[in-house]
Image: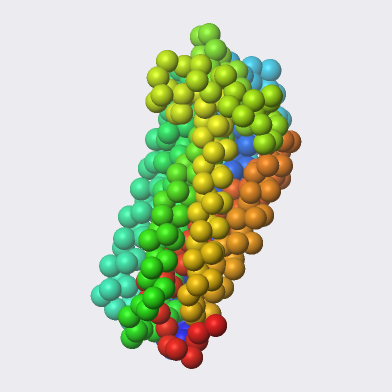
Amino acid sequence: MLKQHQHKSIILWLLSGCFIIYLMIVVGCITRLTHSGLSITEWGVMGTLPPFSEEKWQDVFSKYQQSPEFKEVNFNMTIQQFKSIFWWEWTHRFIGRTILSGVFIIGFLYFFLRKKLDVKLKKRFVFLFVLGGLQGVIGAWMVASGLNKVPAVSHYRLALHLMSAFTVFAFTFWFALDLMHEKDEKPTNETTRLKPWIIGLFVVLIIQIIYGAFTAGFVEMGAENKPLFRPGQIFNTWPKMGESWVAEQVTMKGTLFQNIFENAAGIQFMHRTIAFLVVAMVVIVWIKSNRLTLNKFQYNGITMLIYGITIQFLLGIFTLIYQVPIVLGVLHQTGAFFLFAVCIYLIFHFRKTFNNNLNH
């Protein structure tokens, strides 16, 4: 049963934070796909105040011209072309630093001063602040990896940056769900048998999202750190990788670690393969759920999972075939975000069961 009391405004506040996190992830995706992430070479206060004069623009552009990306990749770029990539990175930072932090800080102060927060909620929101701050630190650390010798950020740091954003969302969404539902729920019934499968699906999905970040962020380098191509730019066929199920290039490097973590073909192969595993686990969860008596929340979660994985799998295929156009890339990441949220929703609702009159 949904709560109808003083927590309604706090729930709306948390859910608005969830939406802004999603917006930040989408803009981050566009920033990655437009290769805009290294356009701002300083962290400082940049992200709140953009250049307001041609002199300021020239100063920011001059700093970018000292970066490896400009020297190795964008050496013919004009200042007008630079502005187009600058604004995506600036917007990404602005959403994270100003809008998201502002929503959380202003909201926290509002509810704190109105004495609507108990000790438990205060601790939870301090925890969210720490996670949000850590997310910013990881972002700066990620950008720094592309400003030294290699004209690309570390795909490991990119994946960590993405997953830290997903983690902030996960806890924010969980806290909102916890406030939306009664505290005196009954212990779980036979549906607890499905919980390990849902958690297993969630773990595999996280690995798949990480490999999605690797696919977007890894750059195969040539001589003298010259960027060659990314995993999404090769073997743009499905279901085979070119003429083979497993392309020879998947095992072209010396060790298993290099082939699955630092090889464009190997990373794409892993992303393809784990996608089938995610689908298989969703099917297992669906089949097992049909043998159980579910409440309406659990039933709705399973239904969203089936529709979500179907759309996401198709998006993945078309994103690959068309070599990751921006629109499909954003939709594909949105699909991953949706499945991530549904898994959290399911874990929450299979953790407890609700009143019998809510059964589907």
Q: Is residue 145 left or right of residue 339?
A: left
User: Looking at this view, is 128 or 158 the one in front?
Assistant: 158
Residue 102 visible in the displayed image? no
Residue name at image x 64 percent, y 28 percent: 241
Across and down, in percent, residue 56 comes to: 58, 33
Relative height, residue 317 to residue 302 (above, below):
above
- Residue 182 in view here: yes
Colour convention: rainbow
**Residue 151, horizontal then vertical, whole percent:** 52, 22
Residue 78, quarter of picture:
top right
**Height in image: 238 above or below 342?**
above
Q: Residue furthest bottom?
A: 357
Q: Which residue is farthest left?
A: 119
Numbered marks: total: 0
Whether 32 is drawn above or below 22: the answer is above
Q: Position of residue 345 (x, y in %)?
A: 47, 67
The residue positioned 68% from the left and 47% from the top of the image is 315
* Percent position of residue 74, x then y: 64, 21
Query: What residue is at 42 percent from the left and 66 percent from the top?
Result: 194
Q: Nearer the viewer, residue 298 or 16?
A: 298
50 relative position to 17: left or right: right
Q: Quadrant of residue 120?
A: bottom left
**Quadrant in the rendering for residue 81:** top right
Most foreground residue, 281 or 64: 281
For this orientation, the residue located farthest to the top is 223
Front residue of 59 and 178: 178
- The quadrant of the rendering that contains the C terminus is bottom right
Residue drawn where x is 34% and y is 84% of the image: 186
Q: Check the image and name the residue furthest to the right.
A: 322
Q: Is residue 266 left or right of residue 118?
A: right
